[in-house]
Image (spheres, grey):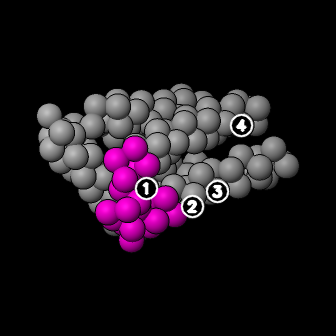
Amino acid sequence: MTLNTGLLGMPADKLPIEWDASFATGVDEIDEQHQWLFRLVNDAHAYWQRDGTPERATLIEIVKGLQNYVVHHFETEERLMIKYAYFKEEVGGASSHCTQHRHFATKITAIQQALIEGGSVDKEQFLDYLSDWLIHHVKNTDQKLGAFIAARRAAVT
Ligand SMILES: [Fe+2]
């Protein structure tokens, strides 16, 4: 039997992904948005489980909803980077962080566009990509930003 291990070696059946304290960044605004993102991915997963072959229009709506929220969330993080001068202090980290955002948003846009143009999407691969990216990005990248912001806030109080 071949086990689909996803992008980061995790089993494909890890969904739904539950937000817990191990994902906390220490910045409430970011954590609340991450919880909402997890929920959107879990909702997409639940939807696909209920209806294995949803209408194309529904799929496009799911991907569009995700894309809109992702853009809003990235704007929030990048606004905080500017507010706390993360770009000045953490030049390498900040640029690579934003590059990860761009890649993710571009990927979702490409999937949305493919659906609009009549193409199909492999739901397992798509959900694996979303959940792997989120888990990896929050734990390896957003938590560094969160720690930086928390330290800045602590320094001024
Ligand atoms: Fe981020």
The furthest residue to the bottom? 92
Among numbered discs 3 and 1, the one appearing first in the sequence: 3
Classify 151 as above or below 58.
Answer: below
SS for tag 4?
A: helix
Among numbered discs 2 and 4, the one appearing first in the sequence: 4
The crowd level at tag 3 (other Cα within 10 Å; few <14, some 14-19, many 20+) is few
Q: Quadrant of the N terminus?
A: bottom left
Pointer 1: what residue? 133
The magenta segment is 81-99
User: Which is closer to the viewer, label 1 or label 4?
Assistant: 1
Pointer 3: what residue? 106
Give the Cα separation between the discs numbered 3 and 1. Answer: 13 Å
Give the Cα separation between the discs numbered 1 and 4. Answer: 20 Å
Q: Position of residue 17 (x, y in %)?
A: 34, 40
The crowd level at tag 2 (other Cα within 10 Å; few <14, some 14-19, many 20+) is few
User: Which is closer to the viewer, label 2 or label 1?
Assistant: 2
Circle 2: residue type: His
SS for tag 1?
A: helix
Q: Position of residue 132 (x, y in %)?
A: 40, 55
Give the Cα separation between the discs numbered 3 and 4. Answer: 15 Å
Quarter location, residue 52: top right
Res. 100 in view: no
Pointer 4: what residue? 60
Pointer 2: what residue? 103
The furthest residue to the right? 117
Q: Is residue 157 magenta?
A: no
Asked whether 19 or 84 is in front, the reply is 84
Circle 3: residue type: Thr
Classify 130 as above or below 38.
Answer: below
Q: Is residue 98 magenta?
A: yes
Circle 4: residue type: Ile
